[in-house]
Image: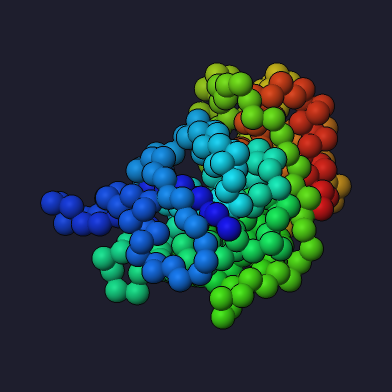
């Protein structure tokens, strides 16, 4: 059994520097050595990047996929990616849209750096290796492992800035657990809808928040974008002023409306007032279903970069969470 561990940075590899704060220092091999693995698993550790996750780019995710596929060609049975937690829910979701191998890819990280008491990185990495090496993980695509829990990226949300149990599953439950060195799945295999990796990802998608008495002046400056995600009130609503400004844009670029509430889908046919979901759809906007704004931006960027039309984008957002 061979597992490839690909390090790209984050708190899990950070140590104190001369400033007194922490920054990326440890390579992938050092992380693997820290867990004292006793199982009969051959680990291939490679450091791809060493950056805090807010500085990751789409192109970095594509590079991870490229390296991971090469590892599989060299007989790797599973991939583990270690990264920072700040953007983990986004990068894991992007990976899940593009990873077309039966070999599992596990994404993990840490909330505490290795120099802190109770650091969680070694445990998370060990659990991830167990999941990647378990035969029942085959054909499950990209998974996230954190604090003994196995997550589906489409449901993943970072809910706390410091807590070790920061990750939660929104609009869907956890899919498995790791207890007593045993991997235990409690859900069937989700069918991940896979898209082509774009030749280039130069489409720009902005996230626009709706807020009480919000300033809509900036809505006049959005014509430079290829798509918009509108993080709307409640079940996907905007103000009277907002809809007047967004209508001309929706004629030219796809505009997707999500809910800022944090859970639950957008509505489709409940409210009919100006700025409601019925009004928005009548004016050409796309309701985001169960997508939060971050994941909606990821999907819309991938679709636009692959040349999907507005009608095709509408179909993808309507059907994605029905795909199991």
Residue at left offset 64%, top offset 64%: 134
Depicted 48 relative to depicted 149: above or below: above
Residue 257 visible (yes or no):
no
Identify which residue, 259 or 121, lies in the foreground: 121
Residue at left offset 29%, top offset 74%: 117
Q: State the quadrant of the N terminus.
A: bottom right
Residue 224 visible (yes or no):
yes
Question: In this rendering, would 67 be left or right of 284?
Answer: left
Identify which residue, 309 or 77, lies in the foreground: 77
Q: Position of residue 55 (x, y in %)?
A: 39, 39
Residue at left offset 53%, top offset 54%: 3
* Extreme residue toward the bottom, this view: 180
The image quarter containing residue 73 is: top right
Q: Position of residue 34 (x, y in %)?
A: 35, 64
Q: Position of residue 53 (x, y in %)?
A: 41, 45
Q: Position of residue 304 (x, y in %)?
A: 67, 25
Depicted 247 relative to depicted 18: above or below: above
Question: In this rendering, would 245 be left or right of 88?
Answer: right
* Extreme residue toward the right, this view: 269
The image quarter containing residue 65 is: top right
Depicted 125 relative to depicted 55: above or below: below
Depicted 292 relative to depicted 168: above or below: above
Residue at left offset 69%, top offset 62%: 135
């Amino acid at each position: 059994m061979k597992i490839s561990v690909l390090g790209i940075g984050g708190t899990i590899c950070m140590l104190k520097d001369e400033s007194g704060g922490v920054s990326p220092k440890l390579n992938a091999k050092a992380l693997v050595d820290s867990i004292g693995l006793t199982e009969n698993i051959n680990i291939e550790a490679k450091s791809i990047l060493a950056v805090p996750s807010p500085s990751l780019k789409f192109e970095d995710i594509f590079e991870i996929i490229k390296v991971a596929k090469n590892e599989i060609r060299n007989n790797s049975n599973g991939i583990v990616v270690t990264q920072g937690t700040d953007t983990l829910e986004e990068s894991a979701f992007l990976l899940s849209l593009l990873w077309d191998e039966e070999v599992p890819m596990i994404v993990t990280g840490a909330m505490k750096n290795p120099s802190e008491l109770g650091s969680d990185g070694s445990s998370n990495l060990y659990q991830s290796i167990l999941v990647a090496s378990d035969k029942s993980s085959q054909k499950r695509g990209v998974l996230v492992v954190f604090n003994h829990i196995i997550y589906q990226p489409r449901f993943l949300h970072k809910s706390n800035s410091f807590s070790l149990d920061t990750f939660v599953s929104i609009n869907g439950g956890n899919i498995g657990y790791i207890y007593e060195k045993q991997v235990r799945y409690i859900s069937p295999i989700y069918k991940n809808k896979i898209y082509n990796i774009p030749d280039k990802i130069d489409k720009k998608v902005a996230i626009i928040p709706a807020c009480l008495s919000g300033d809509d002046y900036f809505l006049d400056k959005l014509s430079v974008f290829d798509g918009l995600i509108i993080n709307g009130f409640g079940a996907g609503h905007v103000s009277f002023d907002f809809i007047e400004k967004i209508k001309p844009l929706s004629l030219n670029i796809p505009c997707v409306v999500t809910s800022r509430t944090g859970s639950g889908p957008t509505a489709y046919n409940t409210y009919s007032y100006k700025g409601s979901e019925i009004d928005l759809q009548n004016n050409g906007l796309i309701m985001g279903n169960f997508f939060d704004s971050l994941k909606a931006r990821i999907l819309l960027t991938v679709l636009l970069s692959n040349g999907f039309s507005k009608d095709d984008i509408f179909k993808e957002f309507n059907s994605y969470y029905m795909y199991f």
